[in-house]
Image (cartoon, rainbow, N blue to C red):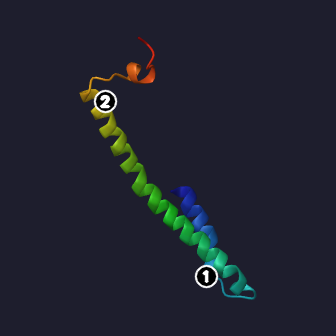
Amino acid sequence: MMTTAAALLGALPLALGNGIGSELRRPLGVSIVGGLLLSQLVTLYTTPVIYLYLEQFAAWLRTHGIRRSEAAEPNAA
């Protein structure tokens, strides 16, 4: 989050600037800020969901009697 915040604050002058040539730099700043915000939100929402699915899968493996060693080495028998 700190990296995203630093990059976002660094791109704000591009997105909000008023000066000579700012009409050329503004689309770049807006796309950087928008991309960083969207990617941070997606990351914050998808990471816990993936962990929940992995936990449910591990619980399913435990209920079906499959151990980690058996799942990792299918030809151990």
Q: Residue at x 40, y 19 (%)?
A: 69
Q: Nearer the viewer, residue 41 or 59?
A: 59
Q: Are marks 1 and 2 in contact (CB under 8 Å)?
A: no
Classify residue 7 as left or right of residue 49. right
Where is the C terminus found, in terms of image quarters? Answer: top left
Classify residue 24 as left or right of residue 32. right
Classify residue 9 as left or right of residue 59. right
Residue 12 makes an appearance in the image: no
Q: Is residue 56 above or below residue 36?
A: above
Number of numbered discs visible in the structure rendering = 2
Q: In the rendered structure, which amino acid carries the disc numbered 1?
A: Leu
Q: In the rendered structure, which amino acid carries the disc numbered 2?
A: Leu
Q: Is residue 27 above or below residue 8?
A: below
Res 47 label: none
Q: For numbered disc 1, what is the local secondary structure? A: helix
Residue 23 makes an appearance in the image: yes
Q: Residue 44's image quarter?
A: bottom left
Image position, residue 7 (x, y; %): 61, 63
Image position, residue 33 (x, y; %): 57, 71
**Viewer-nearest of labels 1 and 2?**
2
Which residue is the site of mark 1?
Answer: 16
Image position, residue 8 (x, y; %): 58, 67
